[in-house]
Image (tube, rainbow, N blue to C red):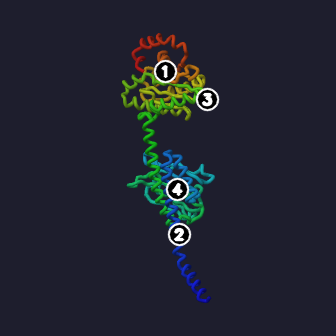
């Protein structure tokens, strides 16, 4: 009996001696499992979607639920490599409206991490006075800023992590988070590349507006939606008056600049729900979902007045000493039930606006069909300048 007791005692002592080793193995195993699971989630994000907002939401879930951080933020650098802007976050303090959301390259803790291309670890925020960010709402806890870098240290942005307890980011965990950050940088880069490629395929290279091909796709969808829900849909055809004259007098480079400026001005004066595209040459088209003809006249007048009052370079060389636009309007249902006919009617109304003297708005009316030939003849017989845009 005594021998049996001594044997058990010895075995227990041996186990106690091995416990630190077992605990270390267990910790390493848990750490490795956490790493694999995190990397799996990152890979899953890219295989599930190429929408950046959805990917950011998956990242937020991973850091909040799996990696147990109290605050998370991803700052992306712009194409000029000069400014970091917060694109996704959770856990910001209640006074977050007062916190800066953009930082110059090298500015404060976020910009510095990117410029030195190294992780910045602040174990105890209360003892840190080198960075202004901590004077704007973060007074305690631990802070970690990791640069998001690709191969050859090409910057994507920075990852910001925070816990309310000081000294809560341990050395082995920081190494894990740096590894995760490298994978996050790859996912963001691939997603941004996909977005940029998609933008190039649907936008006009000069103006940055939607191109005609994409407009036609959106137009078909908006027409179907308008018919299904019996809601109004109005098309505005817009043309820059005497644009050929502007090109001839000022050169094609200035002509391109005017197209960009007019496009920007139009885009700044419509709703987010409206679809603006460059239709060809100096002609633009705007789709106004949920807008009937009477209200679309107000939108058109706002656009016309804004262009007329905007100071464009060398506009004094125009026939009317001012750069202006003409607009034609047609509404689905009220003017036509056919989608392509709607654009044709808006174009006819634009044609009439130009024939009547330009810098004006004309809404399509059935009577235009009867007067179409007369209008064409009047337009062709107008002054030489009047026949050039």
Label 2 to label 4: alpha-carbon separation: 29 Å
Residue 250: x percent and y percent?
A: 37, 27
Position of 206 relative to 118 (above/below): above
First-in-chain label (3 vs 2): 2
Residue 26 is labelled as 2
Secondary element at tag 4: strand
| Viewer can see residue 345 | yes
Label 1 to label 4: alpha-carbon separation: 53 Å
First-in-chain label (2 vs 4): 2
First-in-chain label (4 vs 3): 4
First-in-chain label (3 vs 1): 3
Secondary element at tag 1: helix
For disc 3, the neighbor class at 10 Å (few under 14, some 14 to 19, many from 20) is few
Viewer-closest of 17 and 177: 17
Q: Which residue is mark 1?
A: 344
Secondary element at tag 2: helix
């Amino acid at each position: 009996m005594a021998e049996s007791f001594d044997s058990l005692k010895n075995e227990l002592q041996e186990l106690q001696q091995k416990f630190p080793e077992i605990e270390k193995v267990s910790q390493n195993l848990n750490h490795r499992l956490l790493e694999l699971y995190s990397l799996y989630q990152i890979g899953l994000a890219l295989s599930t979607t190429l929408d950046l907002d959805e990917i950011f939401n998956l990242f937020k879930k991973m850091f909040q639920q799996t990696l147990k951080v109290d605050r998370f933020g991803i700052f992306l650098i712009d194409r000029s490599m000069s400014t970091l802007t917060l694109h996704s976050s959770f856990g910001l303090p209640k006074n977050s409206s007062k916190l800066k959301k953009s930082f110059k390259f090298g500015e404060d803790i976020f910009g510095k991490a990117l410029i030195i291309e190294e992780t910045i670890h602040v174990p105890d925020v209360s003892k840190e006075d080198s960075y202004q960010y901590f004077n704007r709402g973060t007074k305690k806890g631990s802070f970690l800023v990791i640069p998001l870098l690709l191969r050859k240290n090409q910057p994507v942005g920075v990852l910001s992590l925070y816990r309310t307890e000081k000294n809560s980011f341990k050395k082995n965990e920081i190494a894990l988070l740096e590894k995760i950050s490298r994978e996050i940088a790859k996912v963001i880069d691939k997603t941004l590349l996909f977005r940029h490629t998609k933008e190039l395929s649907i936008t006009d290279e000069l103006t940055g507006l939607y191109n005609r091909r994409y407009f036609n796709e959106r137009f078909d969808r908006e027409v179907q939606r308008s018919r299904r829900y019996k809601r109004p849909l109005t098309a505005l055809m817009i043309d820059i008056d005497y644009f050929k004259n502007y090109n001839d007098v000022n050169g094609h480079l200035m002509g391109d600049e005017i197209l960009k400026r007019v496009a920007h001005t139009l885009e700044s004066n419509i709703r987010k729900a409206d679809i603006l595209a460059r239709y060809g040459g100096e002609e633009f088209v705007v789709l106004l979902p949920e807008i009937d003809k009477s209200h679309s006249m107000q939108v058109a007048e706002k656009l016309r007045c804004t262009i007329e009052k905007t100071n464009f370079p060398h506009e004094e060389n125009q026939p009317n000493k001012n750069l202006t636009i003409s607009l034609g309007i047609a509404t689905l249902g009220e003017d036509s039930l056919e989608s392509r006919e709607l654009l044709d009617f808006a174009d006819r109304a634009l044609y009439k606006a130009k024939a009547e003297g330009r810098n004006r708005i004309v809404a399509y009316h059935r009577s235009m069909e009867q007067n179409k030939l007369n209008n064409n003849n009047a337009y062709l017989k107008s002054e030489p300048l009047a026949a050039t845009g």
